[in-house]
């Protein structure tokens, strides 16, 4: 793998912004229209539960397609697949904007979900195509640092567009954003997987590869650590309309109260992860991340057990929690991908599949069960953390002899 020089560092800095924008498309599209939920229900005469299914319809194909997008990019190249998925996403966004019934909106949201995850999956593979060790972790953390802005911008931009122009303008904005991103990738995204390194797109071979990756206990433990710990954050993202509008009493333009602090914590955690690359092993970084999450989750449970929900106290523990999550996730991701150096695209797909399947479960089942009170939401966060911490402990008890488990050397 190449070592960084000042020239390549500048290039990788620009590439990090592009890859972060690609990765941010999925979460931005997930929550940008959340402030419009009540209005969408009124326009279509649909109950809140049915409007909620537009989110589930997005998450399920998002999860399923991420299982294939990395493997397809292993066969056809990173650039070609990324451009195709962005073009389809833009068309789906236009369909959402022009939807005439709630069923049509559900269908076009499903098409959005099927294409939105390509940037996240392929972006991780691009990083591992280019770099290794501490340098890869720095670039991954830089991408995550920019990516952290998306959860805050989504509902804030969506809320103001809703107030000024109506809910359809949110999907019009997504169409324009994805079209601009497609043009940017056409000009600036390099092909990082040479034809000689590509793997034929054979269904039988792919199924064997998926079986190999998904039967690895080490891989599953690492991915479960990522998925379950982040599901606690996603629980609050999905429950934001109820948590903010009902429990905390803010309006459609007040979503920054939740997503601003969350993004601030994410940015700080990702900055810390990049700063510690080369100075602290991946496993130790992850351990510190879980410790921060545990303190924050405990504070969240205790506050809501003793007090009614109130700003800013109901939000402050989330900052500490996402700081810990963002500190741990780059290392957990690299450790998982490094288990399969010849199948990084497929491994990235499998990780994204498990994570988004977990998010879909949260959106479809857990959030409606838990958003009835701020207290039950805090308990849901603590439960997700507990499962994630147990999964990482299972991995750490008998770590495999792979590059991610050894101390990184400092990059020149």
Image: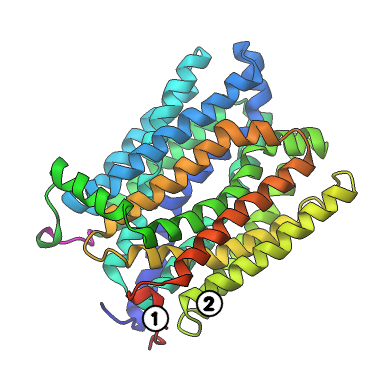
Give the mark nearer the N terminus: 2 vs 1. 2
SS label for mark 1: loop
Contact, mark 2 vs mark 1 (Cβ under 8 Å):
no
Residue at x 83% of width, y 48% of height: 304
Q: Does residue 311 appear anywhere in the picture?
A: no
Residue at x 85% of width, y 44% of height: 309
Quadrant where the C terminus lies?
bottom left
Q: Position of residue 289 (x, y in %)?
A: 59, 68
Q: Which mark is residue 284?
A: 2
The image quarter containing residue 362 is top right
- Residue 112's place in the image compared with 43, above or below, is below
- Residue 91's place in the image compared with 347, above or below, is above
Q: Position of residue 196 (x, y in %)?
A: 9, 61
Going by the image, does 58 lie left or right of 338?
A: right
Crowdedness of circle 1 by 10 Å Cα count: few (<14), some, many (20+)?
Answer: some
Cα–Cα gap, marks 2 and 1: 11 Å
In the rendered image, residue 194 lying in the magenta stretch gets the answer: yes
Residue ranking furthest to the right: 307
For label 1, the residue is 406
Quadrant where the N terminus lies?
bottom left
Q: Does residue 386 appear anywhere in the picture?
A: yes
Depth order, front residue of 359/131: 359
SS label for mark 2: helix
The image quarter containing residue 20 is bottom left
In the rendered image, residue 114 lying in the magenta stretch gets the answer: no
Residue at x 47% of width, y 75% of height: 282
Residue at x 48% of width, y 22% of height: 106
Depth order, front residue of 374/310: 374
Q: Which mark is residue 21?
A: none
Q: Position of residue 287 (x, y in %)?
A: 57, 72
Provide the residue span drawn in magenta.
191-195
């Amino acid at each position: 793998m190449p070592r960084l020089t000042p020239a390549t560092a500048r290039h990788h800095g620009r590439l990090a912004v592009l890859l972060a924008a690609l990765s941010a498309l999925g979460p931005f599209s997930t929550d940008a229209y959340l402030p419009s939920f009540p209005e969408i229900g009124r326009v279509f005469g649909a109950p809140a539960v049915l409007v909620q299914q537009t989110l589930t319809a997005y998450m399920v194909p998002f999860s399923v397609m991420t299982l294939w997008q990395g493997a397809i990019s292993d066969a056809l190249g990173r650039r070609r697949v990324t451009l195709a998925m962005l073009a389809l996403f833009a068309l789906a966004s236009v369909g959402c904007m022009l939807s005439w019934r709630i069923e049509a909106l559900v269908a076009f949201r499903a098409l959005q979900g099927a294409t939105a995850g390509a940037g996240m999956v392929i972006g991780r593979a691009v990083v591992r195509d280019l770099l290794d060790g501490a340098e890869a972790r720095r670039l991954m953390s830089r991408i995550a640092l920019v990516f952290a802005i998306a959860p805050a911008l989504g509902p804030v931009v969506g809320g103001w567009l809703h107030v000024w122009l109506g809910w359809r303008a949110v999907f019009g904005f997504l169409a324009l954003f994805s079209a601009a991103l497609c043009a940017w990738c056409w000009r600036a995204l390099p092909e990082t997987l040479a034809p000689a390194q590509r793997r034929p797109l054979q269904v039988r071979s792919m199924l064997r590869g998926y079986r190999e990756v998904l039967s690895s206990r080490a891989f599953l433990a690492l991915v479960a650590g990522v998925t379950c710990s982040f599901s606690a954050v996603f629980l609050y993202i999905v429950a934001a309309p109820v948590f903010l509008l009902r429990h905390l009493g803010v309006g459609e333009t007040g979503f920054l109260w939740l997503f601003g602090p969350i993004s601030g914590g994410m940015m700080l955690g990702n900055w810390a992860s990049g700063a510690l690359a080369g100075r602290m092993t991946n496993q130790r970084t992850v351990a510190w991340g879980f410790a921060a999450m545990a303190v924050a989750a405990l504070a969240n449970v205790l506050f809501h057990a003793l007090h009614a929900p109130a700003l800013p106290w109901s939000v402050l523990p989330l900052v500490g929690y996402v700081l810990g999550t963002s500190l741990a996730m780059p290392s957990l991701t690299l450790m998982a991908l490094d288990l399969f150096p010849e199948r990084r695209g497929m491994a990235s797909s499998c990780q994204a599949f498990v994570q988004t399947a977990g998010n879909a479960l949260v959106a479809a089942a857990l959030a409606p069960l838990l958003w009835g009170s701020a207290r039950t939401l805090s308990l849901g966060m603590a439960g997700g953390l507990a499962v994630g911490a147990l999964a990482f402990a299972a991995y750490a008890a008998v770590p495999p002899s792979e590059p991610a488990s050894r101390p990184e050397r400092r990059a020149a």
